[in-house]
Image (spheres, helix red, strand yellow):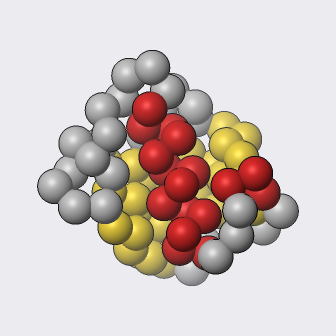
Amino acid sequence: MIINVRVTTKAKFKRVEETAPGCLKVYISAAPEDNKANKAVLKALAEYYGVRESRISIIQGERSRDKRIEIK
C-alpha cells in the first residue's frame, strides 16, 4: 500500500490525521535534522497502522515535508 503524507515537525503533540483516502497528515515533535523527523514519522505510522517499523519505508520525499510512504 502506498500513501501520501504531509509532515509537520516541531508540533506539541504527536498525532496522525487522515485528510483524504490514502492521504495523511502527521504531526511530530522531532526537529527536521539528522534524519530524526523521518524516523519519528515511520514510528508514528507504525503505531497508527499496527505494523512493525521495518515494514514501512519512504519511497519519495526524504528531504521534503510531502512524502510517499510504502507499507508492506
Left or right: residue 44 compared with residue 15 = right
Q: Is residue 1 visible?
A: yes
The image quarter containing residue 25 is: bottom left
Position above or below: 21 against 41: below
Q: Residue furthest top?
A: 34
Left or right: residue 32 compared with residue 71 = left
Which residue is rendered at x = 67% and y = 43% of the image? Answer: 58
Q: Nearer the viewer, residue 6 or 52?
A: 52
Position above or below: 71 against 41: below
Which residue is rendered at x = 38% and y = 73% of the image? Answer: 17
Q: Residue furthest left?
A: 12
Residue 65 spot, x, y in % from top left: 42, 40
Residue 15 spot, x, y in % from top left: 34, 67
For the N terminus, the image quarter is: bottom right
Residue 48 spot, x, y in % from top left: 53, 73
Left or right: residue 19 compared with residue 12 = right
Left or right: residue 54 compared with residue 38 = right
Q: Is residue 2 visible?
A: no
Q: Nearer the viewer, residue 70 or 56?
A: 56
For the C terminus, the image quarter is: bottom right
Which residue is rendered at x = 27% and y = 47% of the image? Answer: 29
Q: Nearer the viewer, residue 21 or 45?
A: 45
Q: Nearer the viewer, residue 65 or 51?
A: 51
Residue 18 spot, x, y in % from top left: 44, 76
Q: Residue furthest right?
A: 72
Position above or below: 65 against 50: above
